[in-house]
Image (tube, grey):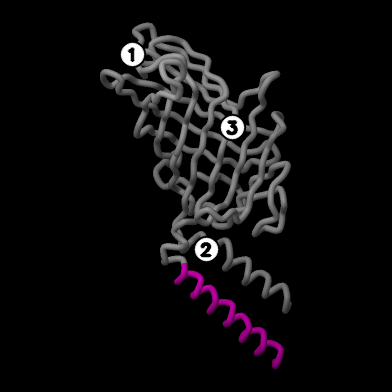
Amino acid sequence: MERYRLNMTGLALVLGCLVAVLGFAATPARADLYLYFKLDQARMQYTANPDGKGGTATVTPLDSQTASAYLDVKLMDGITVLDSARIVEQKDLRFLLDLKMEQLGENNWSATGNLTMGDTLSANKIVGQFNSTEIFTSEVSQGYVYNLNMKGVLSGTSLGDPLLVSDTDPWVFTGESGVLGLDGGAETVSIWGHENWKNGLLMMFQFDIPVSSPDALFSANRDLQGGLVQGQIVPAPAAVVLGLFGLSAVGWYMRRFA
């Protein structure tokens, strides 16, 4: 009975800490928690419609004799890396962004489509719909090199669906290297309460292009290589803090004193 009383006291302390953590989650500091991903060395293959006013594109990892893609996934708190994993082996890298391009006016374009990414070791994925908010070109080298830039938002496949898809909790992304993080693994990023991660941004979608305007670019078939795709996914702050710290703390305590 005495041990039971001590255990319940300790558990109350843990739960009290959770309340404090959740209170801290409401502060601006915890608002910086997000999952970051980056595909380096991407390839965009674009097929123009006959009228030149739209088309379809696929963005995949580049695999060539001169360059190979890699995929980074990081759990971030502001600029601090809490956990990370990287895939460099092409056979383990899964990334596909399907896009439908549409001309809305002179040099005014929109893109909609679907994103699927993850590793090949499990059914855990990032799956969502993409809607562009801005598509523009910028000059890199005067009169010679230009960039295609695309920004947009990510949302669940259906209303209310999470972007992190998994049959079990936690959602786990497994790489081949990384840092020792919250989940205790040096090659994995684990997210508890993954069903709360429903909002995302495609922060940067960038390729070098041979022309200066969107209209000129999308009027013909293109095969763009060596691009960069970056994005982030954010949770409901209180829910994710509970998932990352709270449930694991309670689980540890119950195992410790079982």
Q: Nearer the viewer, residue 62 or 170?
A: 62
- Residue labelled with disc 1: 53
Q: Is 254 rendered above or below residue 119?
A: below
According to the picture, the residue beneath numbered tag 3 turns out to be 40
Mark 1 closeness class: few <14, some 14–19, many ≥20 residues within 10 Å: some
On-image quarter of the N terminus: bottom right
Q: Residue at x 65, y 59 (%)?
A: 182
Q: Residues within 10 Å of mark 2 (few under 14, many from 20)?
A: many
Is the C-beta separation of discs 3 and 2 under 8 Å?
Answer: no
In this view of the protein, which residue sits in the foreground, 105 or 147? 147
As measured in the structure, the alpha-carbon distance from the residue carrying label 2 to the one carrying label 1 is 46 Å
The x and y percentages for residue 34 are 50, 52
Residue closer to the observer: 87 or 256: 87
Q: Is residue 8 magenta?
A: yes
Q: Residue furthest front?
A: 142
Q: Which residue is mark 2?
A: 241
Q: Amino acid at mark 2?
A: Val
Toward the top, the furthest residue is: 50
